[in-house]
Amino acid sequence: MKLYFITGNKHKIREASLALSEYGIVLTPPPRRVAKIEVQSDSLSIIALTAARHAYLELQAPLVAEDAGLFIDALKGFPGPYSNYAYRTIGNQGILKLMEGEDKRTAYFLSAVACICPPYEEVFTGRVDGIIVDEPRGFRGFGFDPIFRPLGSSKTFAEMSVEEKNKYSHRARAFRRLGAWLRAMKGGEQLGGLGDGKLKEPYKTTR
Ligand code: IMP
């Protein structure tokens, strides 16, 4: 089964494609550029679902959109749903500055993957717990990867290959849940070709 992934982030595409390949599902870029609409919300699921719904209106084909964020306990969950803005403004150095002298360094990444495969609409989430390190380490990956070390590893995400990051990452976990769900729907046979291409109410299931 083929699914469009609404993102311009090549790292996300590699990570998600690798996770879904375990389920025989191929992610492809949309046939034409579709903007990922980013609404402001405290809920990653709502942000991802809104982006997916907007993209579906344009493409009328099975697709996924993802929203992710880094939640730092000592900062009461900041930057969370505002991670994109925080990364573009204060960046990794800004986050490390906010964490200066802080002993409590626990944090987690959360990913919400919204899938629209008429007549179904689902959101799958994945989480990885870890630590904000004292100094950025590694040059791979993107975003906050150099300052986040998942529990169970001595490396930051930026020191890992995609395969290694996927053993831990929030994104791989969310996309694997999607893969398992699609497989349970008989490899997607019942999806995509179904219906008249229009979403049906109610379409609000969230996992
Ligand atoms: P987005 O809105 O889903 O693109 O995610 C918001 C921001 O969170 C991104 O711009 C990144 O800075 C950060 N982020 C999300 N996922 C990851 C990840 O897997 N590694 C590092 N940073 C991430």
Image (spheres, rainbow, N blue to C red):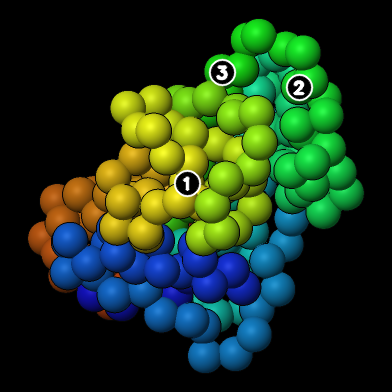
Q: Residues within 10 Å of mark 1 (few under 14, many from 20)?
A: many
Q: Amino acid at mark 2?
A: Met
Per the rendering, the mark at residue 157 is 1
Q: Residues within 10 Å of mark 2 (few under 14, many from 20)?
A: some
Per the rendering, the mark at residue 99 is 2
Mark 2 or mark 3, whichever is nearer to me: 2
- Residue 25 is situated, as x and y percent measured from the top left of the image, at 24, 69
Residue nearer the viewer, 185 or 88:
88
Asked whether residue 112 appears in the rendered view, the answer is no
Q: Is residue 142 left or right of residue 122?
A: right
Q: Is residue 35 left or right of residue 174?
A: right
Residue nearer the viewer, 86 or 100:
100
The residue sitting at 66% across, 36% down in the picture is 135
Between the C-alphas of marks 1 and 2, the distance is: 19 Å
> SS class of the residue under badge 3?
strand
- Residue 193 is situated, as x and y percent measured from the top left of the image, at 28, 77
Q: Tag 1 or tag 3, which sits nearer the N-term?
A: 3
Residue annotated with mark 3: 106
- Residue 129 is situated, as x and y percent measured from the top left of the image, at 45, 26
Between the C-alphas of marks 2 and 3, the distance is: 11 Å
